[in-house]
Amino acid sequence: MNLSATTNWIRPTWLISGLAVAAGLLLLWFGRHQLVNLFYVVTDRDLVTAYLAQLGLWAPVLSLLIVSLQHMTPVFPGQAVILAASGYLYGPAGGFFINMLAAVAASQLAFVLARRAGKPFVNRILPAKLLDRWQTVADKRGFYFLVMNFWFPVIPGNAANYLAGLTSISF
């Protein structure tokens, strides 16, 4: 029996990953009561709006910054943030305004950052595989590819903002 073949699956990375998962599950188990309480607080709209009312004008500014951050980071899930800022906290009209303002501002900022800093910067934000695959198409099709991507998302919209900055389309 080949001893090295039977122990190949036991590698330090698997061991460390397994210990990290076990530690995370233990933390979730021991903190389950606090998580349930947090869930009840967040789902109580009156309590959340009362807390935000204490922040005054800074509450919508904070929401605007959070939604903008979501639009600038390709890995941050946006649907929960957008739903929270729209109907839940500020109603349909206020939420729509905050989301649109944040989306446009963050998209333009990502475009400008990519345009100014170039491909090395974008390579640190986006996976190289995604960038290599779609940059050629975006260069050839330009504006039309990017518009179609927002209507029928082939790549995440957040990534498309950075990708657009690497193309020859104008600001």
Image (spheres, rainbow, N blue to C red):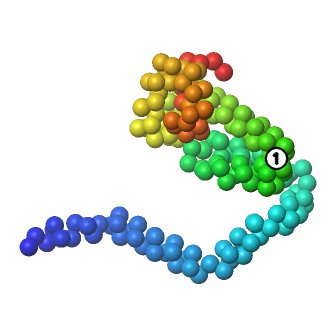
Could you tell me residue 40's position as x and y percent? 74, 72
Residue beneath the point at 50% across and 30% down: 119
Q: Is residue 42 above or below residue 100?
A: below
Residue beneath the point at 46% across and 34% down: 131
| Residue 161 visible here | no
Judge left or right: residue 55 versus residue 148: right
Q: Foreground: 85 or 132?
A: 85
Could you tell me residue 64's position as x and y percent? 77, 45
Q: Is residue 73 above or below residue 13?
A: above
Residue beneath the point at 51% across and 72% down: 24
Residue beneath the point at 79% across and 51% down: 87
Amino acid on which disc 1 is placed: Pro
Q: Quadrant of residue 113?
A: top right
Q: Quadrant of residue 107?
A: top right
Judge left or right: residue 111 versus residue 40: left
Q: Foreground: 121 or 46?
A: 46
Q: Foreground: 133 or 114?
A: 133
Q: Foreground: 78 or 55?
A: 78
Residue, disc 1: 92
Q: Quadrant of the N terminus?
A: bottom left
Query: Element type at marker 1?
Result: helix
Could you tell me residue 141's position as x and y percent? 51, 19
Judge left or right: residue 170 versus residue 135: right
